[in-house]
Every structure is written in structure tokens, then in C-alpha cells.
């Protein structure tokens, strides 16, 4: 989401806040429960960049898309029960190699689980 321009910063930290700059705290079995990611939402002219976020896959209904179906979604076509993407929208896909924005998944020629769409 940072590469797509929705987040300004992503920092590791714990319950009390982000780690100080330059401090590397390794994740160990003893501290894994307390580690957190701190996300900074991006604003432009005092307006938030994320205006809408819609969950596509749920625990009781997973949505898997092939490479061809992701291409159709980007072109604005309805796939399965999901409407196509509009201008300014992004969709995030969970693949075997990580989470990618839909256009990056196409460049890498990968399908996967549709997580969410954002605008």
C-alpha cells in the first residue's frame, strides 16, 4: 500500500509506538507478541488519500482470481460477482510470493486471492 501511494510511512514498533529511527529490534520468540507495524496514512492538501476501502475476500468466502480475471478487472469488466475497477481504484492480490497491487501481479504474471479494493 505504501508503493501504491496510500501510506506515507511503515515502521516496526511495539505497543508504545514506532521504534526510534535506526534502531533495529529483531523479532524473537520472546517478543513476537509485542511487535506491531505502525502505518502513517497519507494526506494531500489536508484530505486523506484513502477515501474508500472494500474487503473482497472474507473468511467464509475467499475470492481467487486467475491472471486473465485480474486483467479483466483492471479493464473495468465484472469478474465473478465483483465489479471492475474504476479510474483511481487499486486492488490488492495475495500471491504465493507476497501481496501485490493488481497491475504488479499482472506484470509478474501471477494470480491469487483478491484481498481488497481501495480508492
Image (spheres, helix red, strand yellow):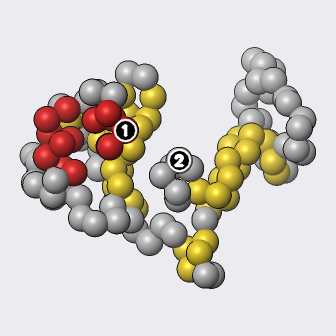
Q: Residue at x 64, y 58 (%)?
A: 8
- Report helix, strand or loop for mark 1: helix
Q: Residue at x 73, y 45 (%)?
A: 11
Q: Nearer the viewer, residue 105 or 35?
A: 105
Residue assigned mark 2: 3
How far, Cα to Cα, is label 2 from label 1?
A: 10 Å
Question: In the picture, residue 99 is in which quadrant?
Answer: top left
The reply, left or right, for residue 66 in relation to residue 33 is: left
The reply, left or right, for residue 69 in relation to residue 46 is: left
Q: Is residue 113 visible?
A: no
Residue 82, relative to residue 68: is it above or below? below
Decide which of tag 2 and tag 1 comes sooner along the chain. 2
Q: Residue furthest top?
A: 29
The reply, left or right, for residue 64 in relation to residue 99 is: left
Q: What quarter of the picture does the C terminus occupy?
A: bottom left
* In contact (CB < 8 Å): disc 2 and disc 1: yes
Q: Residue at x 44, y 72 (%)?
A: 51
- Report helix, strand or loop for mark 2: loop
Residue assigned mark 1: 104
Q: Residue furthest front?
A: 107
Amino acid at each position: 500500500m505504501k508503493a501504491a501511494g496510500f501510506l506515507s510511512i511503515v515502521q516496526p514498533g511495539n505497543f508504545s509506538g514506532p521504534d526510534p529511527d535506526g534502531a533495529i529490534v529483531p523479532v524473537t520468540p520472546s517478543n513476537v507478541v509485542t511487535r506491531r507495524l505502525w502505518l502513517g496514512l497519507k494526506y494531500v492538501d489536508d484530505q486523506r488519500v484513502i477515501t474508500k476501502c472494500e474487503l473482497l475476500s472474507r473468511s467464509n468466502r475467499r475470492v481467487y482470481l486467475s491472471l486473465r480475471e485480474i486483467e479483466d478487472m483492471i479493464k473495468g469488466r465484472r469478474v465473478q460477482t465483483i465489479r471492475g475497477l474504476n479510474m483511481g481504484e487499486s486492488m490488492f492480490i495475495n500471491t504465493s510470493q507476497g501481496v501485490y497491487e493488481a497491475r504488479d501481479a499482472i506484470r509478474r504474471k501471477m494470480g491469487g486471492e483478491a484481498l481488497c479494493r481501495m480508492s
